[in-house]
Amino acid sequence: MSEDLYDIDIVSECLGVTPAVVRRYTRLGLVVPGARRGRHALYTAADLARLRQIVRLTRDLGLNGAGVQVVLRLLDRIKALEREVAVLRLRDGGEPVRRTW
């Protein structure tokens, strides 16, 4: 079973931005395309979700590229810590952690 992949035109249309904006976020390393077909980037559903976060941070909250990098790094760290806590709780026989926010 293969994962759906989306080209930059579909991604930009879904996000309501131009392909140049998606290319800029990719060039800045804010998102890494899930695959490539020749020179063309192809994005996964997870990439699309991350790009939605980036668009929200820039458009709605007014963050610049550096601010977005900081926020994404913190969000990734939070997810990693939540996974670690869940593993430790399960190992100790406790209930799995359920996100409340």
Image (spheres, rainbow, N blue to C red):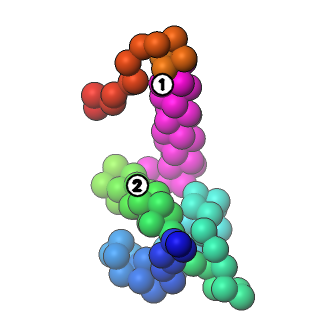
Residue type at numbered disc 1: Ala
Q: Looking at the picture, does residue 57 appear above or below residue 31?
A: above
Q: Please tell me how crowded label 2 is: few (under 14), some (14-19), or many (20+) other residues with Cα within 10 Å.
A: some
Q: Looking at the picture, how far across and down is residue 91, in whole percent?
A: 54, 17
Residue 42 locus on image (x, y percent): 57, 78
Residue at position x 46%, y 13% in the image? 93
Q: Is residue 21 magenta?
A: no
The circle on residue 9 is: none
The residue that label 2 is drawn on is 53
Q: CA distance from mark 1 to mark 2?
A: 24 Å
State whether residue 59 appears in this view.
yes
Quick one: which residue is furthest to the left in this view?
Answer: 100
| Residue 12 drawn above or below residue 65 | below
Task: Confirm whether residue 74 shows in the render.
Answer: no
In this picture, which residue range is highlighted in magenta? Answer: 63-88
| Most frequent secondary structure within the magenta stretch | helix
- Tally of numbered tags: 2
The answer to whether the residues at label 1 and label 2 have Cβ atoms under 8 Å apart is no
Which residue type carries mark 2? Gln
Secondary element under disc 1, as helix, strand or loop, is helix
Rendering coords of residue 65 (x, y %) = 54, 54
**Front residue of 84 and 38:** 84
Going from the N terminus, do you reach mark 1 or mark 2 first?
Answer: 2
Residues packed near mark 1 inside 10 Å, few (<14), some (14 to 19) or many (20 plus): some
Q: Nearer the viewer, residue 59 or 23?
A: 23
Quadrant in the picture for residue 81? top right
